[in-house]
Image (tube, helix red, strand yellow):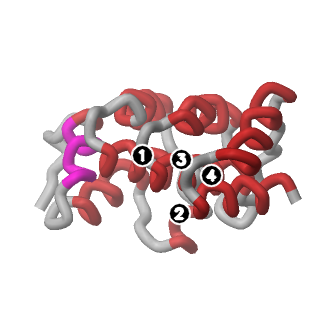
Amino acid sequence: MLTEECSRDELVQRLASKRDRNAAIRALVGGLTCTELRSVHVDDVTIDALARGLADRSPVVRWWCVQLLDHVPDQRAIHLIVPLLDDPVARVRRNALHALGCAACKPTADICLSPETRARIRELADSDRNGKVRDEASRLLA
């Protein structure tokens, strides 16, 4: 069981462990299910830890950090996720695309994507080497 003694950065690292992941998610954001995640409030310390996790060498950690930031109705989360559109791992790119446009995951968010981000999404829809990434980008643009 995870305790409050774990730093946020340690909790982010535990996202890579199937055994520790659910407890780490609850400790980081206070919820686990989609319903719970839609109503969590994430403090600045946690957002900063998740932001550092987006640059982790583990694609599992990066994916889960995107997943958690997807539920943060804060424009900072959107800005943090945008660079993951260029992640070397297709699954991470696809999750980043989802997070940038899913109003259901963050119903109170005012999602505003820059023209540069929209152009990058168009590039992914047209020419990403992974079909699932192209499909997700196309859905986001629709």
Q: What amino acid type is highlighted by mark number 2?
A: Leu
Q: What residue is disc 1 on?
A: 89
Residue 27 left/right relative to 3 = right
Q: What amino acid type is highlighted by mark number 1?
A: Val
* Residue occupying the point 65% across, 30% down: 79
Question: How far apart are labels 4 and 3 at the CA level?
Answer: 10 Å
Question: How far apart are labels 1 and 2 at the CA level?
Answer: 25 Å
Q: Is residue 91 magenta?
A: no
Region in magenta: 10-16
Helix, strand or loop at label 4? It is: helix
Sequence-first tag of 1 and 2: 2
Q: What residue is disc 2 on?
A: 37
Question: How far apart are labels 2 and 3 at the CA level?
Answer: 21 Å
* Residue occupying the point 53% across, 36% down: 84
Dot in front, 4 or 3: 3
Dot in front, 4 or 1: 1
Is residue 91 depicted above or below 100 in this figure?
below
- The answer to the question of whether label 4 and label 1 lie on touching residues, with beta carbons closer than 8 A, is no
Q: What residue is disc 4 on?
A: 99
Sequence-first tag of 4 and 2: 2
- The answer to the question of whether label 1 and label 3 lie on touching residues, with beta carbons closer than 8 A, is yes
Residue 125, position as x, y percentages in the image: 74, 50
